[in-house]
Image (tube, coloured by chain):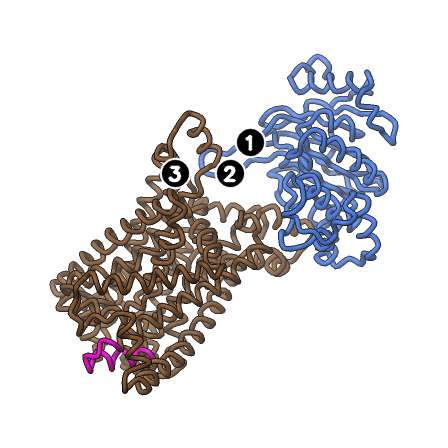
Chain colours: A brown, B blue
Amino acid sequence: MTIAGEADAGRGFSRLPERAETVAILVAVLVGWEVLARTLLAGSFALAAPTQVAAQLAQNWPLYATNVQVTLWTALKGFAIGNAVAVVAAVLIVQWPALERPVFSAALAIYSLPIIALAPILMVLLDRPDAMVALSALAVIFTTMVAAVLGLRSADPAALEVVHVLGGSGRDKLIRVRLQSALPSLFAGLKIAAPASVLGATVGEFMGAERGLGVLITGALASLETTRVWSVAVLATALSGGGYVLVGWIGAWLTPWVHGLEISQAATRGGAGAGPGLLRTGATIAISLVVVFGGWALFIRLAGLNAFFAKGPGDVWAFLFTEPDAAANRALVFGGLLVTLGNAGLGFVAGMAGGTLAAIVFVLRPSVERGVMPIAITLRSIPILATTPLVILLLGRTLAATTVIVAILSFFPTMINMVTAMRLTRRQIVEVLHVMNASRLTILWRAELPSALPALMASARIAVPASILGAVIIEWLVTGVGMGNAILAGVYNADYAVLWAVAAILTLIAMATYGLVSVAERAVLRRYAPEQLA
Amino acid sequence: MRQRPPATVDAATAGAPADEGIRLARLRKIFEGRGAPLLALEDVSIATRRGAFTSIIGPSGCGKSTILRMLADLDAPTFGTVTAHGKTPRELRRASKLGIVFQEPALLPWRTVRSNIELAVQVTGLAVPARTCDDLIALVGLDGFERTRPAELSGGMRQRVAIARALVTSPEVLLLDEPFGALDEMTRRRLNLELLRIWSEQAATTLLVTHSIEEAAFLSDTVVVMSPRPGRILAEVEVDFPRPRKEALLRTPSFHALTDRLSELLAGGGDDDRG
């Protein structure tokens, strides 16, 4: 294995043997899946074989097609609306820097909102279909906004100065330089947004809808129809993965001057420049709190909503601290919070560690990566619902099962970010080490892993809210503990104050944790990638 | 200075003489990527003495960096053999006898100056006394910056760190790929002087790839002039200015005569002098 050969592989020369290897590994995965389903796990209700899934889909195609259409339409609308909002917010931030803190805080609050707690509230406040679209839109705003801000700011300063010297206005700079420069990073964000919008839509359907993939999977889960569960899972994965690939193609077509790795790089760095600097000071925390609570109170007041469903910050305060039942309410919510944080924390750590280990294996064994990575990129968009039945059936309704399911959420993004970052280790550093007769492991340990630390921190920052959300979804769907249990109780008793309290507390916790990780990330960047702080 | 036709070496000669330095025998390199195969080097043969300082100059894309990368075991010839001190590049690398400096300093941003230099010691596992490291830091003029990180250094200082890192293990063969190419002219001259001073203290057989005629003429025992792609050797020019060379040499008529001569050769005006 020569360095030269690896460099070629990294640059993505497509060669026939590599293609063949990729296909071979894909086939191996399918065959392994089939064999596993037919032998070891046969009759366990955990796994359906690919052939069974195919037969199921063929036999009942009209049913699946109708429901795919519903989910697809919801996700498309959510994708369009959410990303439009995100791009407008990004332009506002870049053109009027004074708006940066409030707009960023609002977007982060939206990202931290647990959609599972939000869903029942939105369903009574909006029409059902609109509520689904809203959930789908909310799922994409933050990541796209961060990517767009990063892109708009990546414009070549010299090009901006040329426009300035030619007498161009701020708008000229935006239209002629910034928007084009933003495209690679924006599309990296949109790629992630595609599966996210599908996830948002299915979670909404899950909580109560008439049609859609989320509805099908709940029904199939309840009646233990494994083949139907897996059929829906395959369709949902196809929707997410298809969206991911399609957006990637459109992006590549629109930005022929950019190479694939650079796009991934933008995704890896996602928000390093935007986030950490913002959340450092007490002032920023204060602004975030004002934005969240002010926005919340204003929303309740202006929307003129039914007071039975719509609770403001004051109502939640009363619910938790001044009502006669406040002590019991606190026990429910804060007791649940501890459980949820434990579940989320364990899964988060396991996912980050697993993702890092997998990335190391891939970097050491590029042939494994070439075969598995396309699958992994598709699976990064795997709906959490699809993996749940398998894990629950294998591990039971245990802490281990919750940990695994939450870990899967951070596993794929971490792995992909880490592989990309390690590959982007400066080639000449690797070559210098090679000339020094460094072993493969030495190069990994001394150069590639440290180079990827910033990517690890960026992954952690994004994974924190995702882990909390994942833990709540599992608690709500399967284990009936923690904040998920509080949501169940709220919905069951039609006690909307519980739901608002859960949403508010989880949002604040996720934002605070995001801020803490950002501070740590900044410290890591200062040492390991000072150029990214400039 | 004398000029002699390109050396032709019999690749089959076994048992290297004791004073043999770098030996390239009938090298040919074809790059195969997408599209048509690219002939980068054609029939390149060079033989240098042990401990000699040799430079290769030539237009961009003439394959001079490829030659250096072959000596570094980062690339392999399509045809022909590459040895130094009678060993293959891989043998030299495995024995930790190579030192390399690229145009980019390629420092690890999280390590301090000292720690970046010590990286070579840690990776090669050679027993290098701590004093060697201190001496080198002083030799490249970085006293007081031992605990500084690369981001806080100027481009010239970073490149000094890269040079110290290449030298700390006292390599037998030193490979320099445009080491000062990214620096301004003033810094470049100063570093050239320092490089000569440091080089004279170590006995490394050195190959420098550069765009700068002046740099090649000032530093080298032999300057190899290459043609545009496919890279061939146009001429080998021996430089016999006495050492140690001082900056004043740059202003002498004989130095200017040499650089003019090399410019002509590069421009293709050297045909009448060959054969």
Number of numbered discs = 3
Q: Quadrant of residue A323?
A: bottom left
Labels 1, 3: one chain: no
Check residue A178 in the rendering and tell me which mark sits there, or answer none: 3
For mark 2, what is the residue?
B32
Where residue A48 appears, as percent x and y from the top left, is 27, 73
First in sequence: mark 2 vs mark 1: 2
Label 3 neighbour load within 10 Å: few <14, some 14-19, many 20+: many
Tag 1: amino acid: Leu
Where residue A497 appears, as percent x and y from the top left, is 25, 76
SS category of the residue bearing label 3: helix
Label 1 neighbour load within 10 Å: few <14, some 14-19, many 20+: some
Label 2 neighbour load within 10 Å: few <14, some 14-19, many 20+: few
Magenta stretch containing residue A488, yes or no? Answer: yes
SS category of the residue bearing label 2: loop
Labels 2, 1: one chain: yes
Q: Indicate which label's residue lies in the foreground, 2 or 3.
A: 3
What's the chain of the residue with tag 2? Answer: B
Residue shown at 21%/66% (left/top)? Answer: A122
Check residue B39 in the rendering and tell me which mark sits there, or answer none: 1
Where residue A240 appears, as percent x and y from the top left, is 28, 58
What's the chain of the residue with tag 1? Answer: B
Question: From which residue to which does the magenta span run?
Answer: A483-497
Tell me the quarter of the image containing the N terminus of chain B.
top right
